[in-house]
Amino acid sequence: MQSESEISLKDRISVTEERWRGLMLASRQGDKAAYRMLLDELSRFIRQIARRSAANAQLSGADVEDIVQETLLAIHLKSHTWNENELLGPWVRAITRYKSIDILRRRGGRLHVPIDDYSEELAADSDETQLPARDIIRMATILPERQKSIVVAMFVDGLSTGEAAARFAMTEGAVRVNVHRALAALAKKFGDKG
Amino acid sequence: MRTEDLIDGLARQAGEQASPVENRFGLAEAAGVTVAVGLFLAVLGPRADFADAINTPWYPIKLLIMGGLAALAFPVVTALARPGASVPATYLLLAAAALAAAMVADLVLVGADGASGRMFGRNATSCMTFIPIFATAPFLAAFIALRHGAPTRPGLTGAAVGLFCGAIGGFLYGIFCPDDSPLFVVVWYSLAIAIVAAAGFIVGRLALRW
């Protein structure tokens, strides 16, 4: 016998799951509004998970946002690894867990640093954490010139794929390929640097 | 950048997902296994008494167990390449159970006399050499394809790749190998496959992070 609260929790999960599934399937067909809504909902879901692990590991709010951004980027780049026959929640959760562990491991060194010996470095650290999450655009300096301009145009100036194609005199397909390569390179950079 | 800006930017890329990782893995393995078969035919080929051997019980059983192990390991690899997917790993026990049953049948039907001779066989060294060699092309193909996946357990995924490719190598070498006793298979084939799986574990940890 299940209690009523368990049933309603299950119902809520399946309602969310159904909505996410619908949004993901629409996104796969190129529905940008659906994809935006999905990523927005997922970012809250991820943030919730990330806050919990961050609290355990004494990470800052900026670290939480790093986890959220890295996970969103991973979800975008690896969206083909979600299978329509499976639930989306566990897929997102597994990616979040993987990326969180990755970040925790990279930050690991400073978690165990005794405060007295390293007070200066810690002060510098906390300055850094006053900033919003690490800046993808700042990291974009590692990209080839063309990819960098396209990423800046689309992520900072807010151009659509079509507008970017017109600005850079490329086909939309070429813009997509460039953006995908740029994001993959940035995700890798995220992974290499701590 | 604020998370919202990232979401806006990503949302504009809707509909950009690549082909499913299991399709890529399947294609890569079709190529890798083809190369392995070509290598096998060029280097060894079926054993001289193939026509007779295929009518004995032990030769086909050996090949069925190796082929079965590869068939069961394939979906384990593709599931491990997808975050949060349920991994059908327990079916691998079927291959282990079949091998154990074959071992018992060997001891009962052929007898305990000469069991150690059957176990050490005639060609343990070439078994240990050729199984990893025939596993190599499927192994490389697998890691190229899986860079495209998202394995949350890279080491385990690599080990599963090694198991799959080791079984492919075992199947191919088994067509040539004159030692058919399950006692031989359980020791030497398993050892060779375990070596490939261990290599897969190491390569997985190094190459499958994302």
Image (cartoon, helix red, strand yellow):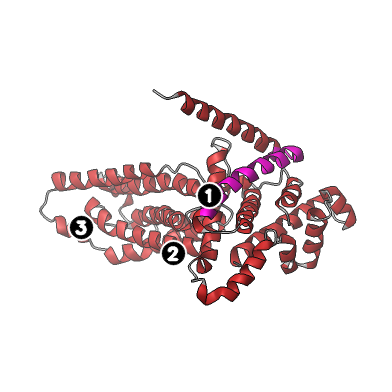
Query: In terms of sequence position, does the residue under pointer 2 or pointer 3 come before the other?
Result: 3
Q: Quadrant of residue B147?
A: bottom right
B139 in magenta: no
Residue type at tag 2: Ile
Residue type at tag 1: Arg
Query: What is the span of residues highlighted in magenta in the rendered image?
Result: A27-55
Specify whether disc 1 shares its chain with disc 2: no
Give whichever of A57, B25 is nearer the camera.
A57
Disc 1 secondary structure class? helix
Can residue A177 be seen here?
yes
- Which of the two marks, 1 or 2, is nearer to us in this view? 1
Quadrant of the snapshot with the N terminus of chain A: top left
Task: Count every numbered label the image shows and give the total.
Answer: 3
Give residue A148's position: percent from left, percent from top: 78, 63
For disc 3, the marked residue is B119
At 71% from the left and 39% from the top, the residue drawn is A37
Q: Main secondary structure of the magenta part?
A: helix
Give residue B10's position: percent from left, percent from top: 72, 49
At 34% from the left and 61% from the top, the residue drawn is B192
Q: CA distance from mark 1 to mark 2?
A: 31 Å
Give residue A42's position: percent from left, percent from top: 63, 43
Confirm or deny contact between disc 1 and disc 2 (CB under 8 A). no
Q: Residue at the front extreme?
A: A116
Disc 3 secondary structure class? helix
Q: CA distance from mark 2 to mark 3?
A: 30 Å
At 28% from the left and 43% from the top, the residue drawn is B97
For disc 1, the marked residue is A52
Disc 2 secondary structure class? helix
For disc 2, the marked residue is B202
User: Pointer 3 indicates a residue of which chain?
Assistant: B
